[in-house]
Amino acid sequence: MRYKYSKNNIIKHFFNILPVKRAPIFLTFHNIEEKDLNWFRLFINLYQDRIKSIRYFHSENINDSDIFLSFDDGFYSNYEVARNVLDQYDIKALFFVTYRFINLNIKESHDFANKNMYPQRNISFSKEYKSMSWDNLKYLSDDGHEIGAHTMSHPNLRNLDSEAQYYEIRKVKDLLEYKLNINIQSFAYPFGSPSNIDHNSFKLVKAHYKYGFVNIRGSISKSISDHLILRQNIVPGMPLWLIDAIVNSKLDFFYRKHRKQLKKNMK
């Protein structure tokens, strides 16, 4: 889905005058359609000196200016972005995939995305919603990118009982490791807001993964747990001034309540 924004110059000016707060961050991308590839290349060009490969995150050799990239869901466009853009800069990212979304045909991919990933919308049919194949995922893994788990079917985990949560959180790890012959150590909560995460799902992620990731704005250092790592969502088509505000932590203040609510949910 492309970003829809106001061209209100007052908003732009407001963000421009806010102080820069350099801190290490994770960025989240989802589906990047072909028409947005140039936009994505421009983003990479602008921040290539700050963008680090995922191995630096695991080494804990992190600097205040570091940016790490993650991609959610398993869209085919993620594979194309990795192969045609990231590889040119030797940037390795973290790709979270939903097991039942992988290896579907174009119609199946659209129907799955419409029902499970965009449940509040009725997305128009498009080949851009195509999912990756197992061969695509194997390529990413062999190329040095990391594969993470994003549940079996992309549900709102908070709406599930404990047995269903266990299936969604643990089963996906087992199957991905079997299919790809790799170790899965990272998990991303679907939707990733405080209203989608409860204490039981957090405990399950903590028990079976080294890291868990949410989609709430804030720096890595502001995360309350290694299993609730904050990420900054970026939507294709975002204006550069807004992306600059995000990567320089200028929006973090406005999401304090979200971070507090997440912490409260864990009690």
Image: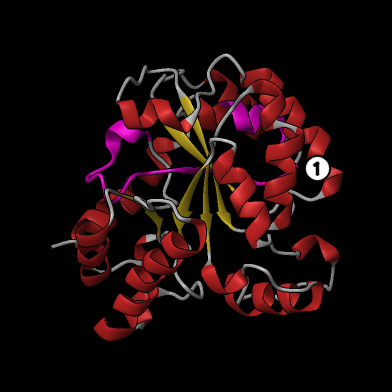
Instruction: Where is residue 167? Give x, y as percent.
Output: 35, 79
Regarding mark 1 in the picture, which secondary structure is present there?
Answer: helix
Q: Residue at x 70, y 64 (%)?
A: 131
* Residue 122 in view, yes or no: no
Instruction: Where is residue 164? Give x, y as percent.
Output: 33, 84
Occupied quadrant, residue 26: top left
Main secondary structure found in the magenta portion? loop
Q: Is residue 230 above or below residue 57?
A: below
Magenta segment includes 51: no
Q: Is residue 64 left or right of residue 265?
A: right
Find disc 1 in the rendering and name its residue. Answer: 36
Q: Amino acid at mark 1?
A: Asp
Q: Is residue 83 left or right of residue 174?
A: right
Instruction: Where is residue 13? Give x, y as percent.
Output: 63, 25
Q: Quadrant of the N terminus?
A: bottom right
* Residue 184 in view, yes or no: yes
Q: Residue at x 23, y 66 (%)?
A: 204
Occupied quadrant, residue 48: top right
Q: Is residue 45 above or below residue 31?
A: above
Magenta segment includes 242: yes
The answer to which of 206 and 171 lies nearer the viewer is 171
Q: Is residue 150 left or right of residue 236?
A: left
**Magenta part of the protein: which range?**
219-244
